[in-house]
Amino acid sequence: MLVHSVIGLAVLAAGAFALETLGTTVGRLGPELWPYLGRASLLGLLLLSVPTIITGIADRDHMYANWHRSHRAKLILSLLLVTALAGQLVAMLVASNRLSAWLGAGVVANLVIVLALAAYGLRITLGRQSFAPTSYLPDMKRKPPVDILETVAAAAAAEPALIDPSEEDAA
């Protein structure tokens, strides 16, 4: 669930940068809020990205036998995002109160990286809802086709292994 926060904070940071650059007032929220909101979003984005990467690697190791191209791309993009965020936050600390153009471009680039991560995440977990097919191949399309019912029937015909609990204490 951490990834949802990362996506939301990336959108919030990019939106705050745009509103700060334009000096926009939205309702009672004035231009003095946008620098604070943008920087707080970037800090939150950095702090949440690290555990998101760690849990993503841990989940991948439990669910997949090898590192598919999508997994490698996500890891590279995640490390790029964390590096960029750390650099941007350090640059903002030493820079003046106003964002420079290249820092603003970096904030928008963060959003692009996060959206690419989301697309790869969808590709890995929900292939039917992503932009490209997953590596999953239905059993009946394999050469030769695999019929799961035949596999289950062979296992069902085997004699069940019975354990007598009274004999366990004797050993």
Image (tube, grey):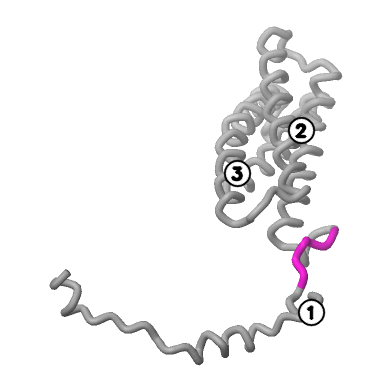
Nearest to the observer: residue 159 or residue 89: 159
The reply to whether callout 1 and callout 2 are in contact (CB within 8 Å) is no
Horizontally, is 159 left or right of 23 in the view?
Answer: left
**Magenta residues, as a range?**
132-137
Rendered image: mark on residue 116 = none
Who's the residue at 68% across and 29% down the image?
A: 82
Q: Residue furthest front?
A: 171
Give the residue number, with chain letter if any, for mark 2: 110
- Looking at numbered disc 3 in the image, what kind of residue is underneath it? Ile
Disc 2, SS: helix
Q: Position of residue 160 (x, y in %)?
A: 40, 86
Q: Residue furthest left?
A: 170
Give the CA distance from mark 3 to mark 2.
21 Å
- Looking at numbered disc 1 in the image, what kind of residue is underneath it? Pro
Who's the residue at 61% across and 84% down the image?
A: 151
Magenta stretch: dominant SS? loop
Give the residue number, with chain letter if any, for mark 3: 57
Give the residue number, with chain letter if any, for mark 1: 144
Horizontally, is 91 left or right of 143 in the view?
Answer: left
Between disc 3 and disc 2, the foreground one is 3
Who's the residue at 74% across and 30% down the image?
A: 80
Horizontally, is 15 left or right of 158 in the view?
Answer: right
Give the CA distance from mark 1 to mark 3.
33 Å
Nearest to the observer: residue 142 or residue 122: 142
Nearest to the observer: residue 161 or residue 80: 161
Name the image quarter holding residue 153: bottom right
Between disc 1 and disc 3, the foreground one is 1
- Looking at numbered disc 2 in the image, what kind of residue is underneath it? Asn
